[in-house]
Amino acid sequence: MNQQKIPATVITGFLGAGKTTMIRNLLTNAGGKKIALIINEFGDLGVDGDVLKGCGAENCTEDDIIELTNGCICCTVADDFIPTMTKLLEREQRPDHIVIETSGLALPQPLVAAFNWPDIRTQVTVDGVITVVDSAAVAAGRFADDHDAVDARRAEDEALDHESPIEELFEDQLTCADLIVLNKTDLIDAAGLIRVRDEVASRTVRKPVMIEARNGEVSAGILLGLGIGTEDDIANRKSRHELEHEDGAPHDHDEFDSFVVELGPIADPAGFVEGLKGIISAHDVLRLKGFVDVSGKPMRLQLQAVGSRIDHYFDRAWTPSEKRATRLVVIGLHEMDQDAVRAAIEALA
Ligand SMILES: Nc1nc2c(ncn2[C@@H]2O[C@H](COP(=O)(O)OP(=O)(O)OP(=O)(O)O)[C@@H](O)[C@H]2O)c(=O)[nH]1
């Protein structure tokens, strides 16, 4: 019997845009659909996987959540993604829908192109690529280069790439989108939202549909059911790297680095968070997230920093079997002085 292709939705977007938050909402409102989740994260801590495994959705149990932690999914398509999908498709009970969260630094194009692999193409189709945007970060100009500075640098060195790696990646993730979700609209006013809409629209020639959201609250009916078949159109959504390297030269993520800081219990979480804010802005840390062991508290403190905006909340009790520890993943540009950042964070403990 010719089985119906399983729809797959790719959820992408820059570091901290709200991908995991949106997926957590989706899992708890998926209308009974059996969902398989593939999560790819930059950095060696697996925070997103831990958060999503904790959301207890019946239609997406721990067995249905697969973490790809060997680097950005765009670089590990052949070694990681394809074998994972092949195994998933061999399962007796096939999912109704597959949701793939790329890392915040991944290019979605190579991942979507992988759906044209023969073993996958006959069984799965890309229902749509959804790019989540941190509207507050766009409104604050985080993705727009200081073009005067770039022009000045470029005047000295013609070979200079005219865009920062962050700006280029931001554009590539928008170029690949079938739907753009302007998230975090609670953090900007109406005038800011207009500026964000204009800025995002100016970054992609394709002008995909743009919707607004807070905390990734978008109905499953919108997110799952775009019915695009994006794998058939991926040749028209080339990334900047593909356009500049028609020879197919591989891309890399050398512009970004991450490392994990492990500490003991923290007695004063509020003071710790304040101290982190200073370190983040002094060293231009792009993203910092993880879990804090607060002295004397049975609950684990989840800490999420996007730029210097830090959220922290007790998310669940430590389990008897797990080792209590404070473990944070720090992500920044390659120029970030990792030793200085690590020492500064350790000094807060
Ligand atoms: N104020 C506000 N915060 C949000 C919203 N959506 C997400 N957040 C917060 O932003 C932080 C990052 O959210 P995540 O969902 O982890 O972002 P992500 O895109 O999965 O992050 P990476 O996987 O690291 O790229 C968390 O503290 C969220 O609670 C929103 O709409 N408004």
Image (tube, rainbow, N blue to C red):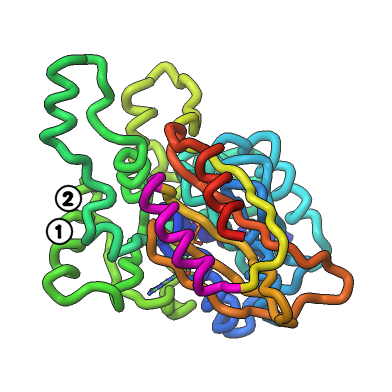
Q: Which residues are magenta?
A: 268-284
Q: Secondary structure at mark 2?
A: loop
Residue 161, horizontal then vertical, whole percent: 27, 25
Q: Residue at x 14, y 62 (%)?
A: 195
**Vertically, is 336 above or below 12?**
above
Name the element at disc 1: helix
Above or below, 233 against 9 in this view is above
- Please identify the quarter of the rendering in which residue 67 is found: bottom right
Discs 1, 2 touching: Cβ within 8 Å: yes
Dot 1, how many residues are within 10 Å of its Cα: few (below 14), some (14-19), or many (20+)? few
Residue 306, x across and y down, in percent: 42, 60
Please name the residue that numbered disc 1 is placed on: 198
Quarter of the picture containing the N terminus is: bottom right
Residue 265 found in image quarter: bottom right
Residue under the point 53% across and 43% down: 111
Identified by mark 2, the residue type is Ser
User: Visible in this render: residue 171?
Assistant: yes
Q: Amino acid at mark 1?
A: Asp
Q: Is mark 2 within 8 Å of ligand 1?
A: no
The C terminus is located in which quarter? bottom right
Q: Is residue 331 left or right of residue 46?
A: left
Q: Rounded to the nearest whole Å, what is the CA distance between mark 1 and mark 2?
A: 6 Å
Tell me where residue 258 appears, x and y as whole percent. Answer: 56, 42
Q: Is residue 73 visible?
A: no
Along the line of sight, the residue nearer the viewer: 200 or 304? 304
Q: Residue at x 44, y 56 (%)?
A: 129
Q: Looking at the rendered structure, which numbered label has been put on residue 202? A: 2
- Locate residue 320, reporting x and y percent: 87, 76
Q: Is residue 277 magenta?
A: yes
